[in-house]
Amino acid sequence: MSKVGVATLPLHGGKAPSWLFKRMVLLGKPIFKILYDMEGSEGILKRLSDTYWFQGLACILGYDWHSSGVTTVLGGVLNEVLNPKEHGIIVAGGKGKISLRVKEHLQRKAKLLEYNGEEIEKLNEISRLVAKIDNAAVQDGFSLYHHNMIVSEDNWVIIQQGMDGDIKKARRYHWLSEGLTNFLDNPHTDISSEILKDKVLNMASKESQSCRKASLEIISEGSNRIKRYLNKLKDSNQTNLDDFITPNKSIELIKVPHLEMPIPFTLKWESIEMAKELALNDYIELLKIRGLGAGMIRALALISEFIWGEPPSWKDPAKYAYAVGGKDAIPYPVNLIRMEKCAEILEDAINLAKINRKEKLGALKRLHNFEKGKKGIFI
């Protein structure tokens, strides 16, 4: 059964207090020790790909349930807590300019997971592609400013976040490689947002398959033809017989319900010519072309719908999210003594149980119940 809740994610400025961040790391370490013992590195990645679990983890560590900083701060905590030697996991990327250093971070730690240069290059290419999809193929008004790629020996998770400065909200995107067969047919494991928008161009939807194909066909006609199509879009209220006929093909102009969406006219036409020369038959390869951004993707989609009658998906792919809280005294202030004691209990549980998993978890429960009854401490 799916679990659904609602939360507001206002954009919060500043940094996480050092006193809180240190204790988030302190408490996070034993939590991930237990998770690794129970489920291994692949289990950890599956959990991180679940937006509800990710949000819950931030809450357990005492951070705001309703802050945009959940993603960025927890990403920093994961970078401190998870490592290749102990968990078989690499955490790459981060906030702002650090998000562009995925390849560098992977190279620094990759030998510990026996990744070679070719595999690192492939992971970096995936990182760039996923960022391009959420920034350009999904046009929801949220510009990415945070990108983490978390890699195990067999799989990867990408967690990235965008902000909409106009409404002062954030949106988080989760990806998991396991089970992913297509980067463009509803590929996300989750997209978390308080706001669902009425109109979002989503070229990463299965519903947009025909529009993606039409976009590639339009590319093959070159930049001059695309400019003429854009002029028709601009002046779509006035038509004549020539608008309905092209050589060897009869085209019926379609009334597009979303033409109030901005039509871009400052575009990098050299990118179109490059795409034309490559004779692309794969939309993924189109997205990979540098300089071909959200404006051109939108222009091609609008032309596909207006001229060819192949509409893209205009449905917002986001989901609602979340639960409980911490740092800003919601629902109560962070109890530092409790956080430190919880970390101590978890470490003791791990150290005391030496034989097998069941005994280790049993020790955890016994210690937890003992401390709860004796001192009122709870996890």
Image (spheres, rainbow, N blue to C red):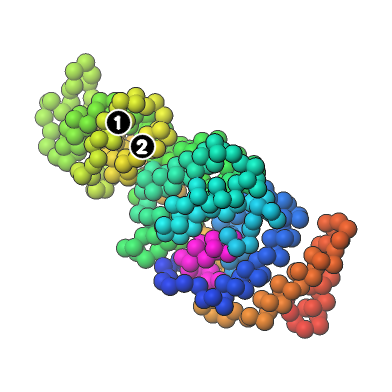
Earlier sequence position, callout 1 versus callout 2: 1
Q: Is residue 334 visible to us here?
A: yes
Tell me which corner region of the image, top left, top right, bottom left or bottom right, holds residue 218: top left
Q: Position of residue 355 (x, y in %)?
A: 88, 58
Helix, strand or loop under label 2: loop
Residue assigned mark 1:
274
Of residue 48 and residue 200, the one placed in the foreground of this image is 48
* Residue 322 image point, x, y percent: 55, 63
Pick whichever, 13 or 332, lies toward us: 13
The answer for how far apart the CA atoms under marks 1 and 2 are is 8 Å
- Verify CB contact (< 8 Å) between mark 1 and mark 2: yes
Please say if 73 is above or below 291: below
Q: Which mark is residue 58?
A: none
Residue at disc 1, secondary structure? helix
Amino acid type of the residue that numbered disc 2 sits on in the rendered structure? Ile
Q: Residue at x 54, y 75 (%)?
A: 18
Side of 280 relative to 238 (left or right): right
* In-front residue for pair 177/3: 177
At 45% from the left and 42% from the top, the residue drawn is 129
Residue 312 visible, this orientation: no
Q: Mark 2 highlights which residue?
A: 289
Residue 70 magenta-highlighted: yes
Residue type indicated by callout 1 = Met
307 or 276, which is in the foreground? 276
Determine whether 339 is above or below 30 in the image. Answer: below
Residue 268 placement: quadrant? top left
Q: Magenta stretch?
A: 61-78
Q: Is residue 303 left or right of residue 19?
A: left
Which residue sits at x=37%, y=27%? 280
